[in-house]
Image: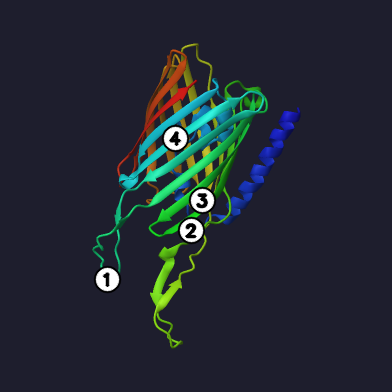
Amino acid sequence: MKSIIRFLLMVSVLLLGADSIYAGGGNRTGTGGAAQLLIPVGTRGIAMGGSNIATATGIEALFWNPAGAAKVDGSATLLFSHMNYIADIGVEYGAVSANFEGFGVLSFSVKSLSIGDIAVTTNTAPDGTGQVYTPQELVAGVTFSKQLTDRIGIGITANYVTEKLDQASASGFAFNVGVAYNDLADISGLSFGIVLNNIGPQMKFDGPGLLQSATASTYNRPPGYFKVDAAPFDLPTNFQLGLSYSPQIDDVNSLTISSLFQNNNFSEDEYKVGLEYGYDNLVFLRGGYTAAAKSSDQYIYGFSAGVGINYDLGGVDVKVDYAYRDVDFFGGNHVFGIALGF
């Protein structure tokens, strides 16, 4: 009973937070920053259209719902993935988690973007000065998750976010909070998840790149450098509610149906659905679809699909996954991932 009360209190707090997000959204589309926080990682979740926050488990759950990271079979897990993102950008991701009996699961993750070199241009050299710079986008996180009961799990992630564009940079912290509830209403296989993502203070660019040479016309002095005061920007907060159902078929075949509503503070709300079929806990086929709440030509995502293979290699649980996400205008995203459980 105490665990259920704690669960209801946490849900209430998250719902209050979601209400403030909704009140601030709508007319703020495109005004948020730190967009790398929104780039998904976790091959299974991407293949299911990002709809699996109620059933995401283990190290795969770190991005989708930190509460699910508490559900692990072994003592430690490693995960590596690569995504061919839009406009020839690569997304590299690595994570490690350790299960401490009686304490919970502690995880560390790093996500970075490989953008490549960009030519430096100026007003007097629009075709380039011959110099290049390499943007750096990094998200490093630490997650604590714990199973309060066999049904209820909680998790919290603290992410350090940093961006560097030539000689200007910004950094800050973003927090994710998640709750997962299994066998909802005593219905076997029915799962519920709730996540509040990217809560944190504003970020602001600073650095020598903001210095501009100018002459103060009202003063009798030579040209000098003046610093541009960059405007601060908010994090791309969102609130998610997910519901999944895994009916009992038999000992060999498994099926998971998932759905999700996502309220975004700086873009249109989204609806997501996903499906996963598993055979003998060895081979998995997945699919999903994502749609904006309003019909918009600017929404570039849609169908997704993937396949996964699990194999016990002499005491080491090996999972190899592939996902494809359809993207308009830039070609699709290809995601490859491998996880090792000990």
Q: CA distance from mark 2 to mark 3?
A: 9 Å
Q: Mark 2 near mark 1, Cβ–Cβ under 8 Å?
A: no
Q: Secondary structure at mark 1?
A: loop
- Label at residue 124: 1
- Label at residue 31: 2
Q: Secondary structure at mark 4?
A: strand
Q: Residue at x 46, y 15 (%)?
A: 253
Q: Nearer the viewer, mark 3 or mark 1?
A: 1
The residue pinned by badge 3 equals 236
Q: CA distance from mark 3 to mark 1?
A: 35 Å
Q: CA distance from mark 2 to mark 4?
A: 29 Å
Of mark 3 and mark 4, the one earlier in the sequence is 4
Number of numbered discs? 4
Q: Secondary structure at mark 2?
A: loop
| Viewer-nearest residue: 47 or 170 | 170
- What's the amino acid at mark 1? Thr
Q: Residue at x 42, y 54 (%)?
A: 164
Of mark 1 and mark 4, the one earlier in the sequence is 4
Quarter holding residue 183: top right
Of mark 2 and mark 4, the one earlier in the sequence is 2
